[in-house]
Image: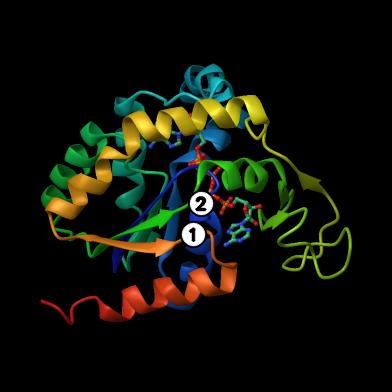
Amino acid sequence: MNLILLGPPGAGKGTQAKLIEDSRKIVQLSTGDMLRAAVAAGSDIGQKAKAVMERGELVSDGIVIDIISERIDEPDSQAGFILDGFPRTVAQAEALDTLLAEKGKVLDAVIEMRADDDKLVERITGRFTCGNCGEGYHDVYKRPAREGICDKCGATEFKRRADDNAETVRSRLEAYHAQTKPLITYYGDRGKLSSVDGLASIDDVEKQIEEVLNGIGSNE
Ligand code: AP5
């Protein structure tokens, strides 16, 4: 099963991608995570991406298309994948269509996670992750069961993203509305789009997505 999670920053794409990974045994492919790893490693791509990400703008299409094309070829993507944060422009969506056709793969569904901008700022500025395993948390909505200890791996170091401040979040939202939102029409026109209410609780959103995934193939 090959999926896209589409939605504004903070809509819960990463949170739900991890839940789908566990339930469906398919891999999360997050271009944001890949770019942050490149920045941390100081690679050529990382050096090009760093300032762009800090401004909350989009990295060039060519860079992310190459990253995703290579990543889809890796062994752990063969059972299926969840694209989280890609595509983000119509040019990226067209490139994805071409590269999936070349690789003999099919896109099964695009799940739009709907959410209002006001709520998203609160979501993003409250976010933190485990410094060891990357498990995601939130100051209000998802705290570790034992304070200061990661539920998943037991680590005690947590981190916050450099672009998770109110000013950069506003730029990221502008980029979403101008460049990514047109993909709702793009995939709607192709009969691939389903929508869920991203403002519901994490459990409820998971259930809504589960319903969409259970329906894949039944309408064909
Ligand atoms: P990226 O890393 O993709 O960030 P984003 O799209 O801005 O999305 P986020 O990771 O911020 O949000 P999310 O939807 O995953 O929410 P989450 O689950 O964490 O991109 C970063 C940057 O990289 C971009 O700005 C750009 O520069 C560059 N980039 C990446 N891909 C690119 C591409 N394809 N092209 C060009 N540039 C690219 O949830 C947020 C918080 O809310 C968490 O704390 C979570 O616990 C909490 N939460 C989640 N769901 C719920 C819920 N239902 N109820 C309550 N709380 C919830």
Q: Could you classify mark 1 by the number of other residues whose Cα lies within 10 Å: few (under 14), some (14-19), or many (20 or more)?
A: many
- Check if mark 1's residue and mark 2's residue have beta carbons within 8 Å: yes
Taking the image as drawn, is residue 47 in sight? yes
* Residue pictured at 26% horizontal, 63% vertical: 109
In the displayed structure image, the side of residue 129 where residue 105 appears, left or right: left
- Choose between 80 and 44: the one closer to the eye: 80
Residue 212: name its quadrant: bottom left
Locate residue 81, reporting x and y percent: 36, 61
Say what amino acid the circle numbered 2 marks: Ala
Any atom of ligand 1 within 8 Å of the CB at mark 1?
yes
Question: N-terminal of the two: label 1 or label 2?
Answer: 2
Vertical order, 39 against 11 (above or below): above
Locate residue 60, reporting x and y percent: 35, 23
* Quadrant containing the C terminus in the rendered view: bottom left
Residue 96: name its quadrant: top left
Vertical order, 152 against 188 (above or below): below
Q: Which residue is mark 1?
A: 198
Any atom of ligand 1 within 8 Å of the CB at mark 2?
yes
Figure label count: 2
Locate residue 4, reporting x and y percent: 33, 55
* Residue pictured at 50% horizontal, 20% vertical: 52
In the displayed structure image, the side of residue 79 where residue 139 appears, left or right: right
* Residue pictured at 83% horizontal, 49% vertical: 157
Q: Which residue is mark 2?
A: 11
- Choose between 123 and 130: the one closer to the eye: 123
Vertical order, 144 against 128 (above or below): below
Say what amino acid the circle numbered 1 marks: Gly
